[in-house]
Amino acid sequence: MNRNNSRWLLLLLFLITFCSAFAQNFFDGDFDRSKQYLLLSHPTKHNLRTVCFLTENRLLEPGKVEFVGVYYAGEAYDYSESARYIAENKLEKFHLQEVAGNLSVDNIYGPNELTQVLKKLFENSVGVIFFGGPDIQPEAYGQENLYSDVTDPNRHLFELTFQFQLLGGSRNPNFVPFLSEKPSYLVTGFCLGMQTMNVATGGTLIQDIPVQVYQKHSPDEILKMPREQLHRNYWQELSSDTTLMGINFHPLVFTDDLFFPRQMHWKNRGMPWVLSSHHQAVGKLGENLVVTARSNDGKIIEGIRHKLYPHVWAVQFHPEVPALYDDDEPTRFSPAGEAKLFPDWIGKNGQAFHQKYWAFFSGALAQAVRSQKKYQSVRR
């Protein structure tokens, strides 16, 4: 083979590899049905990197489970960046799936153009994680927009209809949810992911905690409140100091529900501290949801679970943030405050709680895998 032919062959191989790496239709191809897959909604580069950190540091132990990032074609985010991240880092256990179809506030709580493909995703996976993000449009839960900053409405339409079709809800009581067919399927979320679960099942949101819960309208007023009542850092609106954290840490209080002590095996009655970054919260509770944790003053819901499905739960805080486990940059809450590492902010009790959280998650995932294998054998 002459040099020119060799160059053309190398170019062809490069193009094939390039196109393959950027393919975003994993479940539409000839995927390996003998493997088990965990879905990641909104699979940005940042979220993929987070999952890699959790697995590499054995916080999340997925076993042989592979990950499929799923997203709606109309989202604001450019997922070619995610495809490049997967290709450049040779993440052989990470894949992408784009979902397309017409969505609006009027059709998300029932069968729509996405139902068939969402059912296919459900049938071929063991669970799904919903990550944090911006405000949901209040029209989706029947309210006027008073305090919400909606930057990616199409993402919310997709995640709301996905969670509704998985779990069902009071907005369409005749709809038969997917999980009625496979109750051990895993559905969980952080922050926005919990809010989406609540809205999808028929609940509402508090659009702004300081204004609607505490009647505080300005950063100056808000920062006079006890820090344990703050769910993000408002100093950033008053100071030009770029070293301030954008989040806040506050204690978690468990309800009388047995989710944390029995299912997660958290026997310590001390209040663990968690990372919080939100200004909205659960209002009216969605159908079949139970409150598992609240803020220190009891006014903000911090955890929920589903009454009918054992592996469906969500939290308002962020246990997935890598800096909680491996941090080397001290940060301050206020300009005059002490700078500390994230692990020091939450303390030993908080560190133990977060370790226990991921051990529970890994156990729930293993159970969902076993259930999926039985489900697949019955369907064959």
Image: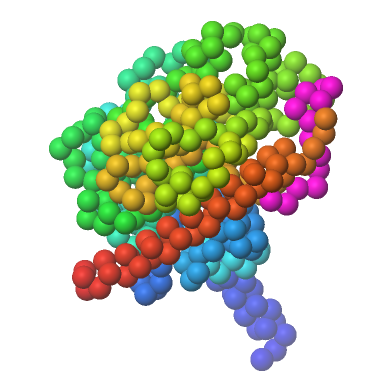
Task: State whether residue 98 is above or below residue 210.
Answer: below
Query: Going 53% across and 67% down the picture, which residue do you hit?
Result: 93
Q: Position of residue 364 (x, y in %)?
A: 42, 58
Name the dominant secondary structure of the magenta segment. Answer: loop
Horizontal side of 84 relative to 147 (left or right) equals right
Q: Residue furthest left?
A: 174
Does any portion of residue 89 appear in the rendered image?
Answer: yes
Asked whether residue 85 is drawn in magenta, I would say: no
Please say whether residue 157 is visible from this viewpoint: no
**Residue 2, position in %: x, y?**
70, 89
Closer to the camera, 351 or 219?
351
Q: Which residues are magenta?
A: 325-337
Quadrant position of residue 285: top left
Check the picture and name the quadrant holding the N terminus. bottom right
Image coordinates for residue 149, horizontal then vertical, percent: 53, 22
40 and 169: which is toward the camera: 169
Say if the magenta span includes residue 331. Answer: yes
Give the image's coloring scheme: rainbow
Image position of 202 with respect to 17: above or below: above
Q: Which quadrant would the C terminus be assigned to in this image? A: bottom left
Residue located 69% across and 30% down the image: 246
